[in-house]
């Protein structure tokens, strides 16, 4: 099996686990009557911390300098958080779709965006410029 295929399979597995962390925290906070925006922000933070560690160690097997890589990872994930928050606001506040269903729908956009950003901006091989 080619390395890119193995990497994609690992990313899908780790992404599934990250999504589980994200959804679980979001769901629990909604059940505790937290506003969807607070629930989403806290679940995002938990998912980002989990995703950074697992992507670095198991998916991209990066040996790059951790502090710089972590800052890049968080900053790029902030971009997807902003997009996600905007989409959730549209679905929940304007279209009145249930928060959990909205989160699932919006996740398709964020999962794809996160993979592309991680692959080509955060965990790129040292000395290789990916754009």
Image (cartoon, grey):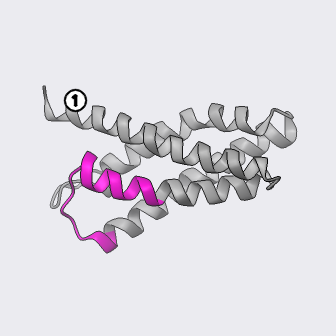
Q: Is residue 18 left or right of residue 8?
A: right
Examine the rendered structure and indicate whether residue 2 appears above or below residue 42.
above
Q: Nearer the viewer, residue 5 or 38?
A: 38
- Asked whether, in this view, residue 8 is left or right of residue 30, the answer is left
**Element carrying mark 1:** helix
Picture residue at 81% right of the left edge, 54% below the top: 35
At 40% from the left edge and 49% from the top edge, which residue is drawn? 117
- Between residue 17 and residue 3, name the one nearer to us: 17
- Residue 104 location (% of width, % of height): 63, 33
Q: Quadrant of residue 5?
A: top left
Q: Position of residue 68 (x, y in %)?
A: 32, 72
The quarter of the rendered structure image containing the N terminus is top left
Residue 120: percent from left, percent from top:
31, 48
Horizontally, is 52 left or right of 94 in the view?
A: left
Residue sitting at the far bottom: 67
- Counting from the top left corner in percent of width and height, residue 44 is at 58, 55
Residue designated by label 1: 5
Magenta region? 49-68
Name the quadrant containing residue 72: bottom left
Q: Quadrant of residue 129?
A: bottom left
Mark 1 neighbour density, 10 Å: few (under 14) some (14–19) many (20 or more)? few
């Amino acid at each position: 099996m080619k390395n890119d295929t193995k990497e994609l399979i690992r990313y899908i597995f780790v992404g599934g686990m990250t999504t589980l962390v994200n959804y679980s925290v979001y769901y629990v906070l909604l059940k505790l009557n937290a506003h969807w925006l607070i629930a989403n922000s806290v679940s995002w933070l938990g998912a980002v911390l989990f995703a950074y560690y697992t992507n670095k160690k198991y998916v991209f097997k990066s040996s790059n300098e951790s502090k710089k890589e972590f800052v890049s990872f968080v900053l790029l994930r902030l971009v997807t958080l902003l997009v996600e928050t905007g989409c959730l606001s549209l679905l929940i506040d304007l279209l009145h779709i249930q928060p959990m269903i909205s989160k699932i729908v919006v996740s398709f956009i964020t999962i794809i965006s996160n993979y592309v950003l991680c692959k080509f901006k955060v965990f790129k091989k040292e000395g290789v410029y990916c754009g």
